[in-house]
Amino acid sequence: MNIVRKDLDPTNSTLTVTVVKADYAEQVEKNLRDYRKRANIPGFRPGNIPMGLLKKMYGDAVIAEEINKQIQDALYNYIKGNKLNILGEPLPNPDHEMADFKTQEDFEFVFDIAFAPEFEVKLSDKDKVDYYNIAVTDEMIQNQLNSYTGRFGKYVQEDTVNEKDMVKGELLEMTEGKVNENGIKVNDAVLTPAYMKDAAQKTLFVGKKKGDVVVFSPQIAFENETEISSMLKISKDQAKSIQADFQMTIDGITRYHESEINQELFDKVFGEGNVKTKEEFLNRIKASIQESLTGDSDYKFTIDAREMLVSKFNDLVFPDAFLKRWLVTANEKLTPDRLEEEYPKIIKDLIWHQVKDKIAKANDLKVEAADIEAYAKKVAKAQFAQYGMVGMDDSILDNYAKDMMKKEENIKHFNERALDDKIIAFVKNTVKLNKKDISIENFNKMLETDND
């Protein structure tokens, strides 16, 4: 088998693959003998089918299958061996005559291949990119503090009802000012005065104590039949017709108390013994907010750095005809109209991919096992933080990261993201940062503009 490359222009070439009978004949015979052992043809026992009949029936298909396999292997090895940085995959040349496996013994196949244009990425402090420092405000710190004190509070039994308390007791339906013995009765009913729409009905409960009896109107007190049906444990249709007053004998008053700012809270948020004073606690809160905001700043920097680098090479000439043909071949759902609409973005993505690849190779940026583990741990930390679980022990993060890395697709993803982080870090350390202080409100408005 022979492969000849012909360059048509700087980004387009053809690979002509010549296949002669000696390349495939022996393997075809072997494939036919193997098939003979298991073929099921009426009138013949498996293994006793005449080879002549087998070749007549299946020979052309077996030859085509074997040649196709050998061509694919040969193309792969040729591209890899010659270190060709091709775009997409080789495509059969549409102008070349189709092979006839019935009449031919020797074949010639022509494939189109394409390359990205050659260019170098040179960065220096002459390249400028904005970098936004988002200010940590006292309001952010206080809001996070309130979140922690609220999250790590506890329920306490009280003697007197406040508006936001959860009141529990027996509910009895009334008729003409008296308990209806045949009416609705709910043991351990629960309500919260704050959820009542009517101020007068709320007032009936506020200030009451355990053992007190309150008479109220569910129909007046609540917004809709859903709330009434839930409280009275009846259907919504039944709740629509409720007009009666109900008597509640209070036997439980539960109030949620936010956590005090003390050692117990410090330990719950940042781990036992890691923070010992309120000042340290507030500093750790500020640092965690700053870490999160730095991530937002880096995300915006990545967007702006990409835009700067892509714009430097927006005059590159790509093999558009080949790329469009390959994109349609690779994605059957991609219509010509949609391709034309999305093609400019595809080229931008392609330039960015090429830029990153050249930066990584030129500066020997590689991902080691430790980098993948570190990125997995970073993902684990971020996932815990979403639920307010900060200051997690390294052992917990390590175990969670290891669990995620048991999946091959996760390792591949972490590897790609870790390399991206290294590339962006290199860009950040090489270009000149035009640092700007900004509030979180204005920063978010700017991101909304970017996404429009």
Image: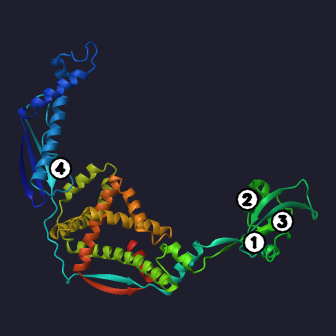
Q: Please tell me how crowded label 4 is: few (under 14), some (14-19), or many (20+) other residues with Cα within 10 Å.
A: many
Residues under numbered marks 2 and 3 in contact, where contact means CB atoms less than 8 Å apart? no
Q: Please tell me how crowded label 2 is: few (under 14), some (14-19), or many (20+) other residues with Cα within 10 Å.
A: some
Measured in 3D between alpha carbons, the distance from the residue under mark 4 to the one under mark 1, in whole angstroms, is 72 Å
Q: Nearer the viewer, residue 382 or 427?
A: 382
1 or 3: mark nearer the eye: 3
Q: Which residue type does callout 1 highlight?
A: Pro
Pointer 4: what residue?
90
Residue 341 seen in the figure: no
Q: Nearer the viewer, residue 91 or 195?
A: 195
Q: Residue at x 57, y 80 (%)?
A: 262
Secondary structure under badge 4? Answer: loop
The quadrant holding residue 376 is: bottom left
2 or 4: mark nearer the eye: 2
Q: Does label 1 or label 3 sit earlier along the sequence?
A: 1
Image spot of residue 73 (x, y percent): 15, 43
Q: Which residue type does callout 3 highlight?
A: Met
Image spot of residue 147 (x, y percent): 55, 76
Measured in 3D between alpha carbons, the distance from the residue under mark 2 to the one under mark 4, in whole angstroms, is 65 Å
Disc marking residue 308: none
Q: Does label 1 or label 2 sit earlier along the sequence?
A: 1
Residue 127 seen in the figure: yes
Q: Please tell me how crowded label 1 is: few (under 14), some (14-19), or many (20+) other residues with Cα within 10 Å.
A: many
Measured in 3D between alpha carbons, the distance from the residue under mark 1 to the one under mark 2, in whole angstroms, is 15 Å
Residues under numbered marks 1 and 3 in contact, where contact means CB atoms less than 8 Å apart? no
Measured in 3D between alpha carbons, the distance from the residue under mark 2 to the one under mark 3, in whole angstroms, is 16 Å
